[in-house]
Image: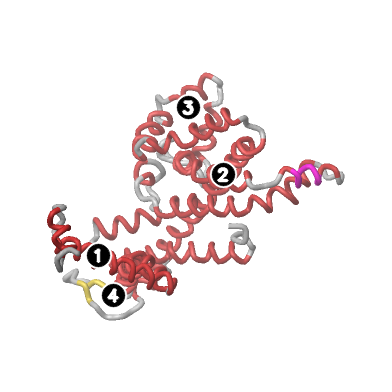
Amino acid sequence: MGPPGGAPSARRSAGVPVAVTGATSTTGGVVRSVSAFFHRHPWAKLLLLLTPAVLWLGVLYLGSLGVLLSYSFFRLEEFTGLLVREIGTTNYQQLLQPTEREIVLRTVAMAAAVTIACAFLAFPVAYYMARYASPRMRLLVYLSVIMPLWSSYLVRGAVAWRSILAGEGVLPWTLEKLHLDGVLRFLLQAPLIGGQSLVQSKLSLFIVFTYLWLPFMILPLHAALERVPGSLLEASGDMGARPWMTFRRVVLPLAKPGLVAGSIFTFSLTLGDFILPQIFGTSQLYLGQMVFTQVGVAGNLPLAAAFTFVAMAIMLLYLGAAKRLGAFEAL
C-alpha cells in the first residue's frame, strides 16, 4: 500500500499542480451546471440570445424614434431660435399649408412612378432568370444586376448619369443624330416631367431613380418567381389558359410577395432621398430635401422631425394596404 496522499504525490511527480486540477474540475462543473440549466429551461436560452438584439432595437432604435417624435411636437422660438419644449401641433399645422402639402404629394407621386417603372422593367429580367436562363447565364445576369451596387452611389447617380444627360452628353447627341431632338424639346415643355434642360427636369430625376433602385426590385422578384412551381404553369396550359391568363391568374399572384418586397425598397428609398433632387430635377423641393434643409440649414429640428414622420406614416399606410391585400402571406 502506498502512503496516505499518494494520489497528490503522483500528480506532483507527473508535474500537474493540485490547485490547477481542482480549478479545472470546478470550472467544468460550473459549465456543466449552466449547460444543464439551459437544457432544462429552453426559454432562458432564448431570452439570453434575444436580449442584446431586443435592447438594441428597443433602446437605441425605437428610443431614438421616440425622441424624434417628441421633438416634432416642440417648436422654435420665433425671435431667438431657441427650442421651446412645449407640446403642440404647430409643426403639423404647418405641414397642412399648400406649399408643404404640395411637397409631400410631389414626393409621393415620384416614388410611386419610380416603383411602377421598376416593376415593369424588373419583371421580364426576373422571369427570364427564374425560368429560361441556364445556370451560367443566370449567374451572368445576376452579376450584371448587382455589379452597379458595388460602385459609389454618387458615382453612379451624379457623375455617370449627369454626363449622359448633359447638353453634350450621349443621350442628347443620340437623339439629335436620330432627328428625335424635337421629341426631347416637347418632353421638356410638359409641365409634369419637363424643366429648363434635360438634366434639370423631373424626367432626368425619374430616370436616375429608376436606374439606381432597379436592382432592389429585380432581386426579391426573382426570388419569388423562382419558387413558382413549373407544374402550375403546365397545368394552366393544359387546361386551355392562354399565356396572358396564366400570367394574370397564376404567376402574378405568386409573385406578389416579391413585388411588395421590392416596392418597399424602391418607394422608401425614393421617398427619403435628398441628394439626387439637388443634382437633377427642377427647383421644386422634395420631402428628403425639406428634412435636410430644416436640419442643416434652418436648424429647425422640430419641423424636420414632423416631415420625417410624414414619410414614415406614408410607408405605414402602404404596408397596411399591402397586408390587407394579402401580399405578406407567402413571405
Which residue is under mark 1? 25
Of mark 4 and mark 3, the one earlier in the sequence is 4
Q: How crowded is mark 3: few (under 14 residues within 10 Å), some or many (20 or more)?
A: some
Of mark 3 and mark 1, the one earlier in the sequence is 1
Of mark 2 and mark 3, the one earlier in the sequence is 2
Instruction: State the predominant SS element of the stretch in magenta.
Output: helix
Left or right: residue 130 compared with residue 234: left
Q: What amino acid is labelled 2 in the image?
A: Ala
Which residue is under mark 4? 74
Q: Does the magenta stretch include residue 50?
A: no
Disc number for residue 117: 2
Disc number lying in front (1 or 2): 1
Q: What amino acid is labelled 4 in the image?
A: Phe
Left or right: residue 200 compared with residue 232: left
Quadrant, the C terminus = bottom right
Q: Distance between the residues labelled 2 and 3?
A: 19 Å
Q: Give the range drawn in magenta.
A: 231-236
Of mark 4 and mark 2, the one earlier in the sequence is 4
Q: Which residue shows up at 37% across the image and 65% down it?
A: 49
Disc number lying in front (4 or 1): 1
Under circle 4, the secondary element is loop
Q: Distance between the residues labelled 3 and 1?
A: 76 Å
Q: Which residue shows up at 44% across the image and 42% down it?
A: 205
Which residue is under mark 3? 171
Of mark 1 and mark 2, the one earlier in the sequence is 1
Under circle 1, the secondary element is helix
Instruction: Please name whichever residue, 59 or 322, is drawn nearer the observer in this view of the structure.
Output: 59
Q: Distance between the residues labelled 4 and 1?
A: 61 Å
